């Protein structure tokens, strides 16, 4: 009998347990920061309600053609100003368009404007806040003085002024809101980095000669994610309100593209305000629904990231 036969016989007589061959994935420890974060988030009842409401909005926006059941721009003058019915569950507007379809497709516009605008000013704030907070000195002074100058002017008036000059369309509104929304978040990120750059792990990275870019993006910014995510979530609600206000004033999304704020312009006419609530009330409730859901979820994220939270 050869050595290989002896090895085969030994393996058959002493088989390796199957359990030992399976690589187990360790579950998160109950005292870990990640476990505590998810536990706090799950226990925040209003936050979970906001998350469900936000998920419903996103589903309606993504599957708008299926949810709406009608084209939001098709007119039928024979059906103008019809009250809610089985064929048109929220009635029709002044030129016979389905109000429910325009409400659902309006969610696409509002969420798109909010996401793009928040992404733009969050990127600007991360760049300026990181440079200002980490480098300090003259660079910090220049960036902060420029930020203070921008914050001296009412943001909404600046947005209205620029929107009145540029052609009114959805892309310009996204860029305008994004460009003028960064100062507050920049100061937040700068304050966080000022407190982090004196921590031991940052000083150790500096001592071993790590480049500035690596220190900022690998050691500092990951610890700023919590406050930035919370601020971006709350900023999303603000961006939707701003877009709705601009559309209400005629400076935002133009006809025939559906928009919540644009629909509210009909409420400026007293007969419609009093006698045709289906023309404006659904859009008003949709804006309130979206803003409340984002504020509830933003508050939940803030409490979940807070180590002093009482939700434990």
Image (spheres, rainbow, N blue to C red):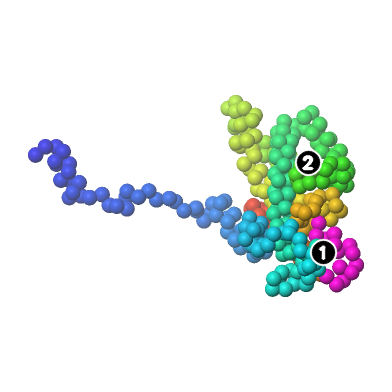
Instruction: State whether residue 286 appears in this view.
Output: no
Residue to which mark 1 is pinned: 94
Disc 2 and disc 1: Cα gap in Å? 36 Å
Over which residues does the magenta segment extend? Answer: 262-276
- At 70% from the left and 57% from the top, the residue drawn is 105
Quadrant of residue 267 in the image? bottom right
Front-lying residue, 221 or 87? 87
Where residue 195 sits in the image (x, y, percent)?
70, 40
Label 1 residue SS? loop
Label 2 residue SS? helix
Vertical side of 278 occupied by 251: above or below: above
Task: For the N terminus, give its image quadrant.
Answer: top left
Instruction: State whether residue 149 appears in this view.
Output: yes
Q: Is residue 239 shown left or right of residue 152?
A: left
Residue farthest to the left?
1
Where residue 268 sits in the image (x, y, percent)?
89, 62
Residue to which mark 2 is pinned: 179
Front-lying residue, 297 or 162? 162
Quadrant of residue 217 in the image? top right
- At 72% from the left and 53% from the top, the residue drawn is 109
Magenta region's main secondary structure? helix
Task: For the C terminus, give its image quadrant.
Answer: bottom right
Vertical side of 193 occupied by 282: above or below: below
- At 20% from the left and 46% from the top, the residue drawn is 11
Q: Nearer the viewer, mark 2 or mark 1?
A: 1
- At 26% from the left and 49% from the top, the residue drawn is 16
Where residue 307 sits in the image (x, y, percent)?
64, 53
Where residue 82 sits in the image (x, y, percent)?
78, 70
Q: Is residue 250 shown left or right of residue 5?
A: right
Q: Are marks 2 and 1 in contact (CB under 8 Å)?
A: no
Q: Residues within 10 Å of mark 1 (few under 14, many from 20)?
A: some
Residue farthest to the front?
78
């Amino acid at each position: 009998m050869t050595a290989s036969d002896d090895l085969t016989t030994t393996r058959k007589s002493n088989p390796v347990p199957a359990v030992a061959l399976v690589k187990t994935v360790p579950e998160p420890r109950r005292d870990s920061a990640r476990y505590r974060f998810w536990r706090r988030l799950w226990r925040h009842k209003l936050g979970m309600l906001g998350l469900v409401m936000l998920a419903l909005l996103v589903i309606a926006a993504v599957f708008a053609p299926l949810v709406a059941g009608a084209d939001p721009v098709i007119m039928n003058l024979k059906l103008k100003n019809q009250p809610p019915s089985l064929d048109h569950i929220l009635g029709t507007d002044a030129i016979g368009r389905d109000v429910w379809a325009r409400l659902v497709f309006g969610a696409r516009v509002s969420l798109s404007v909010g996401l793009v605008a928040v992404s733009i000013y969050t990127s600007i704030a991360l760049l300026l806040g990181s440079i200002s907070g980490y480098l300090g000195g003259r660079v910090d002074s220049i960036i902060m003085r420029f930020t203070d100058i921008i914050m001296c002017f009412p943001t909404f008036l600046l947005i209205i002024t620029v929107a009145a000059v540029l052609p009114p369309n959805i892309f310009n509104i996204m860029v305008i809101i994004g460009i003028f929304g960064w100062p507050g978040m920049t100061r937040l990120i700068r304050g966080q980095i000022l407190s982090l750059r004196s921590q031991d792990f940052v000083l150790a990275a500096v001592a071993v000669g790590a480049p500035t870019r690596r220190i900022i993006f690998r050691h500092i910014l990951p610890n700023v994610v919590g406050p930035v995510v919370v601020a971006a979530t709350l900023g999303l609600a603000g961006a939707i309100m701003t877009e709705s206000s601009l559309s209400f004033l005629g400076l935002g999304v133009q006809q025939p593209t559906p928009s919540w704020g644009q629909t509210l312009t009909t409420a400026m006419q007293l007969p419609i305000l009093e006698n045709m609530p289906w023309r404006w009330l659904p859009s008003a409730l949709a804006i309130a629904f979206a803003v409340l859901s984002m504020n509830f979820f933003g508050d939940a994220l803030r409490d979940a990231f807070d180590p002093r939270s009482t939700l434990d």
